[in-house]
Image (cartoon, rainbow, N blue to C red):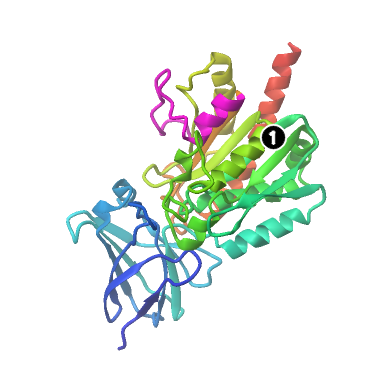
């Protein structure tokens, strides 16, 4: 039989083909442009119908996060709509660390990715649909280095300034799936959570902070290899115009509540990271964050507080990271939401693992938790 075909010359595509023999391929993940980060892959396999594929992605001990590969199953789709999981195994001793993906497609073409991709075309559909919704203002915050727009959707008439922003790291596509779920809640006039949040808040939503990295198939950086979530203290027009535009817009509105949405390669659960260690830390500001964390933990099994990142010591916060900078700069209740690439062991879903659908459902839980958090603050003010 003829060899399978593998290509990735499309929006967010990323793979290097080293060798193909029949239905077996040896592959590698190229690094982000002008960067050492490598983890995101997205490619399609042709000539595959009815054949057991063996796809070996090599050199992964030198990837950005080697701890992300054990226990991980690759995402696969034959229609680019429903994304399932393909049985995968990791051998750290084979070819510098090899992830072997095995899958037998029913169709002649199958797509594989690190997580279900969120294309720039889908991003534009999302922005267009939200911008056409009643009460939504489209805001163009600036342009990226590749000339793409930095899109923001503003809505609501309340006094609480809320910023929701995602995908500073473009390969963390979970973040924009979350944004799709959030915008569905916020723009649906029949949704009670969205209606009440628009009444009580002024919401600014940036679904994709890094369009250039997204289109280029990067894991973590923009067009010139810059990690945007290390630019918030001193963003520049020539290296990080995305952060500069968003932070300037925040300066104009002020920020009371902020959520920066991400994905984590190694930890197989959703969790929050706060702003411990900022110079202006107060117990009252910290308790506001912990109150929100407790509310979200109570609302859904797809969130937990047992696993997460180590908290910074007093005065040890990295102010180049957005959550720390926003909390310090505005006195805001700020946080980073992390979602997994792997399945949630406390609530497993073998066919899809952690999925776009679960990202969207978590978004609704996060917004409902925000509403409850506002209630808790109101009750404290009344007492």
State the residue lying farthest toward the left: 93
Up the image or down, 224 lies above or below 44; here it is: above
Observer-nearest of 217 and 371: 217
Q: Quadrant of the N terminus?
A: bottom left
Q: How far from the left and from the top, in percent, is residue 340?
A: 44, 46
Observer-nearest of 160 and 316: 316
At 71% from the left edge and 25% from the top edge, which residue is drawn? 375
State the residue lying farthest toward the bottom: 1
Main SS class of the magenta portion in the image: loop
Up the image or down, 61 lies above or below 282; here it is: below
Q: How far from the left and from the top, in percent, is residue 66?
A: 29, 49
Among the 4 quarters of the image, the one containing residue 199: top right
Whether 323 is among the magenta residues is yes
Up the image or down, 280 lies above or below 349; here it is: above
Q: How far from the left and from the top, in percent, is residue 309?
A: 40, 32
Disc 1 on helix, strand or loop?
helix
> In the rendered view, does 154 fall on the left or right side of 95?
right
At 41% from the left edge and 52% from the top edge, which residue is drawn? 225
Q: How far from the left and from the top, in percent, is residue 230?
A: 45, 39
At 54% from the left edge and 15% from the top edge, which residue is drawn? 282
Specify whether residue 42 is in view: yes
Q: Quadrant of the C terminus?
A: top right
Q: Label 1, on which residue? A: 252
Q: Which residues are magenta?
A: 303-330
State the residue lying farthest toward the front: 238
Whether 319 is among the magenta residues is yes
Mark 1 neighbour density, 10 Å: few (under 14) some (14–19) many (20 or more): few
């Amino acid at each position: 039989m003829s060899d399978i075909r593998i290509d990735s010359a499309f929006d967010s595509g990323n793979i290097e083909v080293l060798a193909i023999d029949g239905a077996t391929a040896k592959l590698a993940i190229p690094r982000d442009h002008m960067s050492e980060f490598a983890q995101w892959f997205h490619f399609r396999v042709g000539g595959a119908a009815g054949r057991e594929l063996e796809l070996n992605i090599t050199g992964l001990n030198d990837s950005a996060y080697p701890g992300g590969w054990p226990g991980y199953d690759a995402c696969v789709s034959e229609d680019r709509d429903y994304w399932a999981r393909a049985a995968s195994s990791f051998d750290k001793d084979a070819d510098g660390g090899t992830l072997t993906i095995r899958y037998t497609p029913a169709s002649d073409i199958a797509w594989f990715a690190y997580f279900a991709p969120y294309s720039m075309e889908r991003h534009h559909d999302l922005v267009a649909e939200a911008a056409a919704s009643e009460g939504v203002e489209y805001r163009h915050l600036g342009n990226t280095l590749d000339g793409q727009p930095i899109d923001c959707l503003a809505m609501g008439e309340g006094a609480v300034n809320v910023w929701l922003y995602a995908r500073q790291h473009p390969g963390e596509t979970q973040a924009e799936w979350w944004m799709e779920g959030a915008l569905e809640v916020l723009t649906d006039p029949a949704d009670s959570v969205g209606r009440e949040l628009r009444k009580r808040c002024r919401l600014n939503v940036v679904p994709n902070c890094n369009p250039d990295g997204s289109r280029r198939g990067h894991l973590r950086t923009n067009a010139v290899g810059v990690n945007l979530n290390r630019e918030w203290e001193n963003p520049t027009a020539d290296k990080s115009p995305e952060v500069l535009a968003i932070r300037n817009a925040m300066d104009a509105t002020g920020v009371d509540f902020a959520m920066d949405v991400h994905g984590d390669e190694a930890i197989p659960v959703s969790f929050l990271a706060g702003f411990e260690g900022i110079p202006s830390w107060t117990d009252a500001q910290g308790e506001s964050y912990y109150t929100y964390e407790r509310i979200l933990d109570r609302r859904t099994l797809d969130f937990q507080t047992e696993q997460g990142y180590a908290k910074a010591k007093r005065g040890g916060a990295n102010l180049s990271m957005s959550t720390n900078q926003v909390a310090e700069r505005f006195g805001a209740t700020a946080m980073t939401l992390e979602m997994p690439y792997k399945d949630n062991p406390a609530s497993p879903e073998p066919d899809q693992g952690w999925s776009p659908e679960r990202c969207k459902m978590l978004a609704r839980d996060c917004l409902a938790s925000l509403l409850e958090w506002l209630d808790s603050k109101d009750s404290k003010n009344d007492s």
